[in-house]
Image (cartoon, coloured by chain):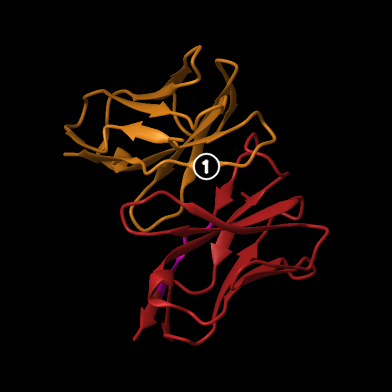
Chain colours: A red, B orange
Amino acid sequence: GESVGLHLPTLSVQEGDNSIINCAYSNSASDYFIWYKQESGKGPQFIIDIRSNMDKRQGQRVTVLLNKTVKHLSLQIAATQPGDSAVYFCAESPATGGGNKLTFGTGTQLKVEL
Amino acid sequence: DAGVTQSPTHLIKTRGQQVTLRCSPKSGHDTVSWYQQALGQGPQFIFQYYEEEERQRGNFPDRFSGHQFPNYSSELNVNALLLGDSALYLCASSLSLTGELFFGEGSRLTVL
């Protein structure tokens, strides 16, 4: 069946460096992609999203890149801080809006070393 | 403004028992979705409620059922618990079917 997967289960970076978390998706019909951050013992927290008609979207210290040709999504975090340590999930959906089912990947653990 | 609230936060059950988890959506939200998150995995969609009806359902057995009340709160029921049902159960709400999705902190279920 369709799935969303991540390349790396764990990513360790030095404080102040940039982080790049990658995600591959297989459902070519997906129209909407979201990155979530999940800290230990908490629910997923929205970071940034992108529609399939875009290649790049920037937020505060975060950038999402979408390559539809190879079905690849990435999250870039600039100047990574200790508070960025968490598990990051990409999710895909057929459309925007909470009425649509999200399909999550397995997650990447980001560890920020001081 | 309270966000999505879930109860209980933690609970322990034994195999074969039944469990009910509760969710109060964010103020003003009318759509509730439930996800199961096994340890070390991403959340998996169980089902969604809108206008007190189950609108969508993921690949979960009939042991998983739910309900949405007129005040938009929701319950997730799991019957005949299996060890594999141990997971974090997440509730998410949105304003109608087009609004942004907000997640609660989850209910951690352990089945012994």
Question: For the image shown, how many numbered marks are present on the structure?
Answer: 1
Q: Position of residue B80 (x, y in %)?
A: 28, 25
Q: Is residue A52 left or right of residue B28?
A: right
Q: Where residue B98 appears, x then y in whole percent?
A: 70, 35
Give the labeled residue for mark 1.
B102
* In the image, residue B41 above or below residue B14: below
**Image x and y of residue B109, in percent:** 26, 39
- Vertical placement of residue B64 versus A72, above or below: above
Q: Which corner quadrant of the image does residue B85 belong to?
A: top left
Q: Quadrant of the C terminus of chain A?
A: bottom left
Badge 1: residue crowd in 10 Å (few <14, some 14–19, many ≥20)? many
Instruction: Name the kind of residue labelled 1 in the image.
Output: Phe
Instruction: Report which quarter residue B18 is drawn in.
Output: top left
Q: Residue at x 36, y 49 (%)?
A: B38
Horizontal and vertical percent for residue A8?
Answer: 49, 74
Q: Residue A60 magenta-drawn?
A: no
Label 1's element?
Answer: strand
Q: Magenta residues?
A: A105-110
